[in-house]
Image: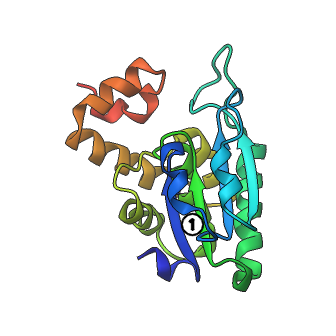
Amino acid sequence: MASDFVPFGLTVCGLSELCNFGGGKVSHVLSILDPEMAEPSDFGDYGEHERLELRFHDIIEPTRGQIAPERSDVERILDFGRDLLSDPVDCRHLLVHCHAGVSRSTAALTMILAQAQPDRPAADAVAAVVAIRAQTWPNLRMIEFADDILGRRGELVAAVRQRHFTLGKQRPELVQFMIDNGRIREVEDLID
């Protein structure tokens, strides 16, 4: 499904899975790390590849002692995606990762796909990411910035909120986890 959005392979993963993609399997990496995290050593096995590294925490509200994703971070992600699409021959396979491969990375890939096919419904971009990564829970703050930048008029936000609702219904423990971690806006439709 994602292959009809972009002409190159796509992977979303967490830090523990990075070791599976060395040896030239990927040509481009979008790396989203916590600010205090050391550089993953796995990239030494990747060979030649282009890489954008961003550092911010997986939060959706400004939080004391943590660095929230900002509009400028989303602009850099979209610029990276735009560059890949301007010369797709150079990109054989894009790997997007964050700590767990669930929130920041899936938000980043969702916005890259939505940008790649602006005439397609945002729900298609979300579904394409879910097909790659079943536990997709895109970071709402990142998606809100992307929706605005891409001129989606709330469509991208609505598609991601629907994903949160669907997965929250399937896995109620995630709803409590999001509440406990300051992400209540992502689950407010699931709270009685």
For the N terminus, the quadrant is: bottom left
Q: Compared to 111, does 56 lie above or below? A: above
Name the residue tied to disc 1.
Answer: 114
Q: Is 74 displayed left or right of 177 in the figure?
A: right
Q: How many marks?
A: 1
**Residue at figure coordinates x 50%, y 58% from the top left:** 20
Residue 11 shown left or right of residue 151 in the figure? left
Which quadrant of the view contains residue 63? top right
Judge by depth and name the residue closer to the eye, 139 or 95.
95
Q: Position of residue 31 (x, y in %)?
A: 66, 50
Q: Could you tell me the amino acid type at mark 1?
A: Ala
Q: Secondary structure at mark 1?
A: helix
Q: Residue at x 46, y 21 (%)?
A: 181
Nearer the observer, 25 or 180: 25
Q: Taking 136 as reference, is 149 left or right?
A: right
Which residue is located at x 53 percent, y 77 percent?
Answer: 5
Image spot of residue 149 (x, y percent): 70, 55
Mark 1 neighbour density, 10 Å: few (under 14) some (14–19) many (20 or more): many
* Whole-percent x, y for residue 11 in the image: 51, 63
89 shown above or below 192: below
